[in-house]
Image: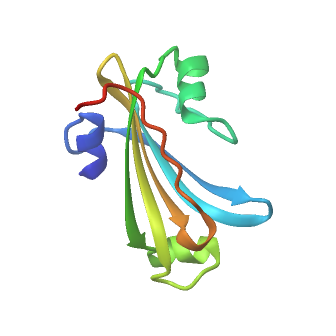
């Protein structure tokens, strides 16, 4: 339901899901799920070690021109904890990222990062008030 809403799709709409583990050296750092509408890429994109926006541009002809990010503190569920080799309910940072092309959502990812191994750096561009 969360994914459908983020992609502007109806409940039950078909999406591709790519799951991958991000590493820092040899250590697992994050578990990531990236969701793409099937209508955008019927065969399904292959990410491997490529950035989502690059794959969309090179393989689907879609240029991402806006990205929304939300970061929240949470704890790791059992599946992610097992993959990351940490205890269940370990502290984590969850990053939800929505990529848009001309106002249309084209990808949505959820990444769970080990809180003991990451630091958040935020650059903000745009208008300033006051």
Residue occupying image coordinates x 49% and y 83%:
88
Question: Which of the 4 image quarters holds residue 15?
Answer: top left
Relative to residue 64, is residue 95 depicted above or below? Answer: below
Residue occupying image coordinates x 68% and y 41%:
48
Residue 29, percent across and down? 64, 63
Q: Residue furthest right?
A: 26
Quadrant the C terminus occupies: top left
Residue occupying image coordinates x 24% and y 35%:
9
Residue toward you, 55 or 30: 30
Residue 119, percent across and down? 57, 60
Residue 112, percent across and down? 49, 62
Colour scheme of the picture: rainbow
Residue toward you, 115 or 96: 115
Count of numbered circles in the view: 0
Residue occupying image coordinates x 48% and y 17%:
63
Q: Residue furthest bottom?
A: 87
Q: Residue furthest left?
A: 10
| Residue 71 located left or right of residue 103 | right
Relative to residue 16, is residue 120 depicted above or below? Answer: below
Residue 90, percent across and down? 50, 80
Relative to residue 88, is residue 59 depicted above or below? Answer: above
């Amino acid at each position: 339901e969360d994914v459908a809403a983020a992609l502007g799709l109806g409940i039950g709409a078909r999406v591709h899901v790519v799951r991958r583990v991000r590493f820092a050296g040899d250590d697992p750092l994050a578990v990531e799920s990236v969701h793409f509408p099937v209508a955008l890429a019927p065969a399904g994109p292959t990410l491997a070690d490529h950035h989502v926006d690059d794959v969309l541009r090179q393989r689907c002809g879609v240029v991402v021109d806006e990205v929304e990010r939300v970061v929240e503190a949470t704890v790791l569920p059992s599946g992610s904890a097992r993959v990351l080799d940490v205890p269940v309910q370990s502290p984590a940072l969850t990053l939800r990222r929505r990529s848009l092309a001309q106002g249309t959502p084209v990808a949505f990812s959820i990444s769970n990062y080990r809180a003991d191994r990451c630091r958040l750096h935020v650059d903000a561009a745009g208008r300033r008030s006051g």
